[in-house]
Image (tube, coloured by chain):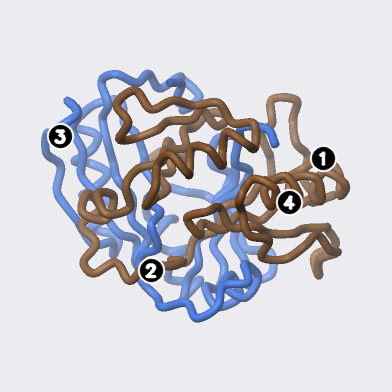
Chain colours: A brown, B blue
Amino acid sequence: MDQRISLITLGVADLGRAMGFYSGLGWEGSSPDGDVAFYQAGGMVLALWSREKLAADSVVAGDAGGWGGITLAYNTRSPEEVDAVIAEAAAGGGTVLRPGAETFWGGYSGAFADPEGHAWEVAHNPHWTIADDGSVTL
Amino acid sequence: MDQRISLITLGVADLGRAMGFYSGLGWEGSSPDGDVAFYQAGGMVLALWSREKLAADSVVAGDAGGWGGITLAYNTRSPEEVDAVIAEAAAGGGTVLRPGAETFWGGYSGAFADPEGHAWEVAHNPHWTIADDGSVTL
């Protein structure tokens, strides 16, 4: 197994609402069939699909709803950009989980949940470099 | 917000066990402090961190445990490779959620859960091209 992730699928209850939220953040994607939506995200793909169908496809018994131990993160090139993204997410129907603030690891971060409850940290990590193409290298 | 994901953090109950599992799949990473582990994954980073700390950091109230509506996927270059990865995951302590089989969308896929219960689909999608560097383009 190569060391990479090809696709992350976020289960959603309302595809139109979820697509509207990510569209509001400036993401361009499409749902050719109105069932699943795909967004190019750097060298991988973010998908939005019915949480119920995703649970069945992932052979998950008894989805209790809510968070499941996975948080996504978006790294910015400055602390100011953290605040801007959090504000943009809030304006577009996301929930601010915590506003931007200095972190114990020497960076600056905040977090929001999308309308489906999926958590995103938005972070400026001065120890990590973001390349022109958006990729992050340890 | 640029259209990219920088980091995915998987919450774990047992960091050593989780690191052993991904190491068994051939992933190389490190945990400088024994608290969080980082793996370069293409142009992004996969992290393993205490699920309890991640829940607190993500301001999630009352983590019910279990799956939370997010499934990762690893795309292969052939159907045979799907079976190989699923077998490797099972041998390393993962749980086979479903063995490789033809899918309704014209591909071939199976799925496993890592020892912490995080679901991975392993898929060969003949409609998607995987570049030499492992990146996937829609």
Label 3 is placed on what type of residue?
Thr
Q: Could you tell whether B110 is left or right of A34 in the image?
A: left
Look at the numbered disc 1 and give the secondary structure of its residue: loop
Q: Could you tell whether A137 is left or right of B75 in the image?
A: right
Task: Identify the mark nearer the N-term, 1 or 4.
Answer: 1
User: Circle 2 sits on which residue?
Assistant: B116
Instruction: In this rendered view, identify the residue nearer to me: A79 or A99.
Output: A99
Q: CA distance from mark 4 to mark 3?
A: 38 Å
Q: CA distance from mark 2 to mark 4?
A: 30 Å
Foreground label between 4 and 3 = 4
Look at the numbered disc 2 and give the secondary structure of its residue: loop
Instruction: Please determine if labels 1 and 3 lie on a single subunit.
Output: no
Task: Identify the mark nearer the N-term, 2 or 3.
Answer: 3
User: Circle 1 sits on which residue?
Assistant: A77
Label 2 is placed on what type of residue?
Glu
Tell me the quarter of the picture where residue A26 sits: top right
What is the chain letter for disc 1? A
What is the chain letter for disc 3? B
Contact between labelled residues 3 and 4, with CB atoms less than 8 Å apart: no
Contact between labelled residues 3 and 2, with CB atoms less than 8 Å apart: no
Q: Position of residue A50 (x, y in %)?
A: 32, 47
Label 1 is placed on what type of residue?
Arg
Pointer 4 local density, CA inside 10 Å: few below 14, some 14–19, many at least 20:
many
What is the chain letter for disc 4? A
Instruction: Please determine if labels 2 and 4 lie on a single subunit.
Output: no
Image: A135 above or below A61:
above
Image: B34 above or below B38:
below
